[in-house]
Image: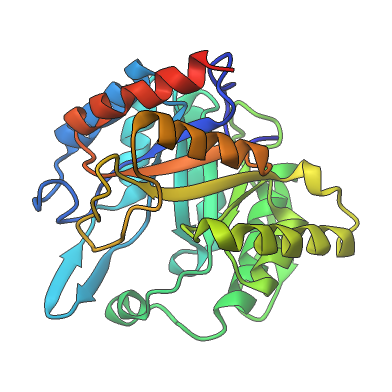
Amino acid sequence: MTASATPCTSRRPVRLTLYLPIAEGIVDGSIPRWEEVLALARHAESVGFDGVALGEHFFARFGEHPVGAWDCWSWLAGLAATTERVTLTALVTCTNYRNPALIAKMAETVDAMSGGRFVLGVGAGWLQDEFDAFGFPFDHRVDRFAEAIHIIHGLLRTGRVDFTGQYYQVCELELRPRGPRPSGPPILVGTTGPRMLRLAARYADVWDTNFRPADELPALQATLDAACAEEDRAPATIARSASVTLSLAGESNSFGMPAQLSGTPDEVAASLRAYATAGFSDVVVSLTPCTPEGIDEFLPVLDLLDHEP
């Protein structure tokens, strides 16, 4: 099972997903509105992106400046009903923000709304300001995640779970009704930590690099492969997804994150092919500027990937 519900364009070496902005300040320093993000998603779909992704953050402070974001699940449901082809990915939802059985229910619902185009990305969370502001517990995040993904995986794959843990309990729970896929949507784990990689090896269909620099990826892949061996699982059964910041002009995004990929369309296309050579089936692009014009400037890269050997 791969990160996409639909195959990549015929000769494209990797599937390309566009990371959509739903936080304040990302699009021209303004608050992204639903109509704008929907237009971006539809434009990305029309020009040939394989998927779109939304992150999950609610609130953060960068210095003295608070930043908020829309709820990604509400917008994923909206995109499920208003797009036709692209894969929709939660990249990633924090299992410590909701009951895990509820997350499984939400994932199955969005997958049904989209006709089987949803990928459930999950992680343990990291932004303590956000946890503190909303009153979510920040302690034992990986322990909590381990119980949560056990419940989520069991519900999506078998439709039922009975589990009593230290943090979560579900009693003879059945996931009903079921969506369009008998085993539910793919599960993506976005992480780089050793314990989390072990959990990815146990439960995930897809692993995402969480915007790590390219020179760190071989060691992370080796750690995941070793975890797969410990779990008696073939490493090739986990799809690899690389999240990257990209600007043809080399601009940092609105939060000051530098572009990991930049240059001419030929240079960027070559960099994306290198991910495929390294074993990645998917690349999630956080594009600067993420506007209709920015997408159009990226079109030569798509063309090169689709038509060059």
Looking at the image, can residue 185 be seen? no
In the depicted view, which residue is nearer to us: 49 or 100? 49
Q: Position of residue 133 (x, y in %)?
A: 27, 79
In the depicted view, which residue is nearer to us: 13 or 101? 13
Q: Can you say whether 157 is above or below 266 in the image?
A: below
In the depicted view, which residue is nearer to us: 61 or 59? 61
Image quarter of the C terminus: top right
Q: Can you say whether 178 is above or below 261 in the image?
A: above
Q: Position of residue 81 (x, y in %)?
A: 35, 25
- In the rendered image, which quarter is residue 257 located in? bottom left
Q: Position of residue 183 (x, y in %)?
A: 71, 36
How many numbered marks, from 0 up?
0
In the visual, does 48 lie left or right of 225? left
Image quarter of the N terminus: top right
Q: Can you say whether 94 is above or below 242 in the image?
A: below
Residue depicted at 19% across the width and 35% down the height: 291
Instruction: List the single residue furthest toward the bottom.
Output: 139
Looking at the image, can residue 303 be seen? yes
- In the rendered image, which quarter is residue 78 located in? top left
Snapshot colouring: rainbow
Residue depicted at 22% across the width and 33% down the height: 294
Q: Can you say whether 166 is above or below 70 in the image?
A: below
Q: Position of residue 172 (x, y in %)?
A: 72, 57
Residue depicted at 88% across the width and 59% down the height: 229
